[in-house]
Image (tube, rainbow, N blue to C red):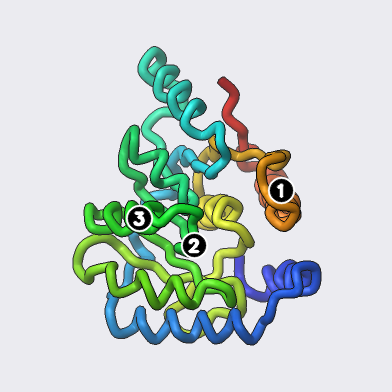
């Protein structure tokens, strides 16, 4: 998705949530400058998605039990969603790491727990691809954690939700979870399976519920786009 296609959604998000475009752009500029100084090109590493099954982990409370069920099904039926690329949304990486390392992590580094960012840094050090996202409310997290991503280990790809400056990418999406889906679709995933997605989670704040509602609508738009192209629909895992 190019920015011109994403822009109407972005403008609506700014209006509905009262976010500042200027702050988004300032964070993106900071991430751009840091990335240029510290990381080389890594976009080609996302070609691993093309033509593959992609399993995306959201960070809903049911994720761990769904992963247990998924791996049980995979063990008993090797053809069940075989050899997927595992993509984790921010704190979901900490849960997925109990089973295997994520191949790709999509994060804005503001997970609920300190160990979430630490685990993401550990995965990067072990060779995972990490997409670090800049927006107006996470500049402090960028300043805190970026120096801990050491050059020459994993693959580092900077992203933003505003118009992307030099060497920053915007594949579309709002929350970490739906950005994973936009990413998988943009790079030609054959099939997309979602675990740990709960748009009706009653344990979150009203603000988070509003964000989940927005994410749900964006995922529906990606799904409809895939259907219109003749690609497979996005599936939610069922135990």
- The quadrant of the image that shows the N terminus is bottom right
How crowded is the residue under tag 1: few (<14 C-alpha within 10 Å), some, or many (20+)?
some
Question: For the residue carrying disc 3, how many other residues have a C-alpha within 10 Å: few (<14), some (14-19), or many (20+)?
Answer: many
Residue 6 in percent (x, y) is at 68, 69
Q: Is residue 212 left or right of residue 136?
A: right
Q: Is residue 78 left or right of residue 11?
A: left
Label 2 or label 1, whichever comes before in sequence order:
2
Q: Which residue is pictured at 44% across the width and 49% down the height?
A: 50
Q: Quadrant of residue 99?
A: top left
Residue at image location 45% in from the left, 53% down from the top: 113
Which corner quadrant holds the C terminus? Answer: top right
Of the residues tagged 2 and 1, which is closer to the observer? 2
Residue at the (47%, 21%) spot, across then down: 69
Q: Is residue 182 above or below residue 14?
A: above
Q: Which residue is mark 2?
A: 110
Q: Nearer the viewer, residue 38 or 3?
A: 38
Position of 203 compared to 147: left or right? right
In the rendered image, which residue does mark 3 sit on?
120
Q: Earlier in the sequence, mark 2 or mark 3?
A: 2
* 21 over 62 or under it: above or below: below
Q: Which residue is mark 1?
A: 216
């Amino acid at each position: 998705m190019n920015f011109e296609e994403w822009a109407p959604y972005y403008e609506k998000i700014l209006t509905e949530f009262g976010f500042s475009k200027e702050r988004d752009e300032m964070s993106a500029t900071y991430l751009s400058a840091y990335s240029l100084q510290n990381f080389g090109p890594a976009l080609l590493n996302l070609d691993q998605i093309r033509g593959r099954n992609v399993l995306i982990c959201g960070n809903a409370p049911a994720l761990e039990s769904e992963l247990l069920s998924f791996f049980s099904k995979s063990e008993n039926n090797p053809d069940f969603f075989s050899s997927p690329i595992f993509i984790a949304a921010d704190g979901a990486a900490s849960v997925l790491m109990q089973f295997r390392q994520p191949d790709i992590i999509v994060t804005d580094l503001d997970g609920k727990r300190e160990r979430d960012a630490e685990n993401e840094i550990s995965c990067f050090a072990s060779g995972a691809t990490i997409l670090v996202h800049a927006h107006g409310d996470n500049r402090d997290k960028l300043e805190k954690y970026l120096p801990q991503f050491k050059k020459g280990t994993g693959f580092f790809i900077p992203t933003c939700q505003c118009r992307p400056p030099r060497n920053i990418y915007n594949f579309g999406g709002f929350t970490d979870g739906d950005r994973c889906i936009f990413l998988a679709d943009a790079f030609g995933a054959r099939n997309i399976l979602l675990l740990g997605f709960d748009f009706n989670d009653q344990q979150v704040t009203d603000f988070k519920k509003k964000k989940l509602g927005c994410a749900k609508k964006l995922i529906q738009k990606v799904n409809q786009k895939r259907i219109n192209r003749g690609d497979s629909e996005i599936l939610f895992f069922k135990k």
